[in-house]
Every structure is written in structure tokens, then in C-alpha cells.
Image: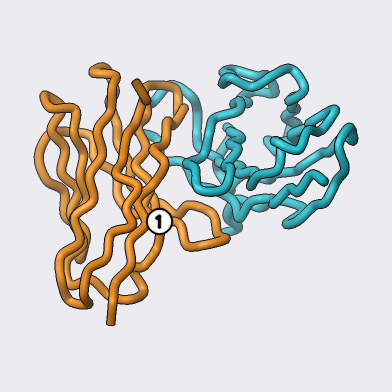
Chain colours: A cyan, B orange
């Protein structure tokens, strides 16, 4: 049973560029959430996708956008990259959005470096 | 006030001792609570979940929840060097949106 998979594992970009990160949820999960984890900090919620729609959004600018496909996989897009966007980007999957007890399982992350 | 607060540490304990990690949260309506372990350069790994007041034990790990005090803790008994990691407290306020603390770095000294 495959867990949450993310690609690529590492990425180096320059300021102003655009980046796309990809995530496939754990088998049986239909909800994908994206988190940003800066060095020495806890993960910060970016947004959540369910039924191919953005359901919740954290305090991130519109430069951060996403998409969910019919097979539940998801992409995170970041435009006009800033140095401060350098972080570990984590994808988490779960089932549904209505329960508060549902456990989230994280992928291995994409380490993004913006130069 | 931060949603979730943890002592950043670092916390050092000798091998075989009990490690105690603490967390407080600000939203009294929070309903579920999680502890994740994160090794350096790796992603968070879920180790404990707790939903009601009291203690929950799983092997060497015990999670404790006190909703009246808005306090969650994690005890690690018989600490091993392999337990050295950052421990993240997370709170779910609804719809699977987790709020994380900054984490406590634990070092177990052989």
C-alpha cells in the first residue's frame, strides 16, 4: 500500500521563477493538504483540496495556487518566487473533510531552494 | 497568541529516562490532538493521537490531554537514542486543518 508520494524531492529555482510540486495521496484518501515548513519552524497550512476544489486556505498570498485531479492527486504552484519561499513543502492526505479526528499522513516533502 | 505553543528546547535526557514534552493551545474549541516525530531532513511521522481528556498509552509513549487547561503532553518512557528528533504538537480545530507548534528538539544521550 503506497503512502503519500511527492515529487520532486529537491528543487533549486531563482527569484521570479515559477515552480510546480506534485503529490499523490495515500490509497483510499481523497483529501490533500499542503504545508510549508521553514527551517526550525512547524509546518504552516497553505490550503486543502477535496473533490477537486480548494476547501480551506491558510494565510498565504495568491502566488500560491493548486489543483486537484480526478484521481485525487494534487499540484502546488508557486509563482514569482521569493527568497522567503525556500522551505520544505509537505503534502498530507486524509479521508474527507468533515471529521476532526481524521489522521493526516505526510509525504516525504519537496525541499525548495530559491536563490 | 500563537495557536499552539511548545518549548523549543532543546531537551536532553539520558538513555532510559523519561522524556516529557509539553504543548498548550489557544482555541478552547479544538477537538483532536496529535504528536508527530520529525527526524532531521525528514517529514513528520504521526506517533500519537488523543481526542478525550486523560491518558492514552501506546508502547513507550503516553499522551495526556487536559482540555480545561488547554494542555497536551507526551511522555516517552525508557528513552532511546533513536528517539532523538523534533517532536511536533498539532491541533485539529476542524476539517482536517492542523495547526502545529514549532516543535521541541529532544536529544537522548547514550
Does residue A100 lie above or below B8 as drawn? above
- Residue B78 lies, in percent from the top left, at 17, 72
- Residue B36 lies, in percent from the top left, at 39, 50
**In the structure shown, which secondary structural element does the residue marked by tag 1 occupy?**
strand
Left or right for A108, reference A10: left
Q: Which quadrant of the structure image shows residue A32?
A: top right
At a point 78% along the width and 31% down the height, the residue shown is: A78
- Residue B94 lies, in percent from the top left, at 39, 21
At a point 89% along the width and 32% down the height, the residue shown is: A16
Picture quarter with the N terminus of chain A: bottom right
At a point 75% along the width and 38% down the height, the residue shown is: A83
The residue beneath circle 1 is B86
Left or right for A102, reference A14: left
User: Given the current orientation, which residue lies at the most extreme bottom position?
Assistant: B110
Residue A7 or residue A14, whichever sits in front? A14
Chain under label 1?
Answer: B
Amino acid at each position: 500500500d503506497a503512502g503519500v508520494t511527492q515529487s520532486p524531492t529537491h528543487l533549486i529555482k531563482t527569484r521570479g521563477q515559477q515552480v510546480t510540486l506534485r503529490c499523490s495521496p495515500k490509497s483510499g484518501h481523497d483529501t490533500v493538504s499542503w504545508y510549508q515548513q521553514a527551517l526550525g519552524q512547524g509546518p504552516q497550512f497553505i490550503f486543502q483540496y477535496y473533490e477537486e476544489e480548494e476547501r480551506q486556505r491558510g494565510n498565504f498570498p495568491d502566488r500560491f495556487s493548486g489543483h486537484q485531479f480526478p484521481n485525487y492527486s494534487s499540484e502546488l504552484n508557486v509563482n514569482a518566487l521569493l527568497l522567503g519561499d525556500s522551505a520544505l513543502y509537505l503534502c498530507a492526505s486524509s479521508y474527507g473533510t468533515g471529521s476532526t479526528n481524521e489522521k493526516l499522513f505526510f509525504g516525504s516533502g519537496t525541499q525548495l531552494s530559491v536563490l | 497568541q500563537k495557536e499552539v505553543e511548545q518549548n523549543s528546547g532543546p531537551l536532553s535526557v539520558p538513555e532510559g529516562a523519561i522524556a516529557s514534552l509539553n504543548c498548550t493551545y489557544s482555541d478552547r474549541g479544538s477537538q483532536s490532538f496529535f504528536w508527530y516525530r520529525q527526524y532531521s531532513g525528514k517529514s513528520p511521522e504521526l506517533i500519537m493521537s488523543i481526542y478525550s481528556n486523560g491518558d492514552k498509552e501506546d508502547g513507550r509513549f503516553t499522551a495526556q490531554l487536559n482540555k480545561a487547561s488547554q494542555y497536551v503532553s507526551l511522555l516517552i518512557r525508557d528513552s532511546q537514542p533513536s528517539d532523538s528528533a523534533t517532536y511536533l504538537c498539532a491541533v485539529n480545530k476542524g476539517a482536517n486543518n492542523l495547526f502545529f507548534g514549532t516543535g521541541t528538539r529532544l536529544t537522548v544521550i547514550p
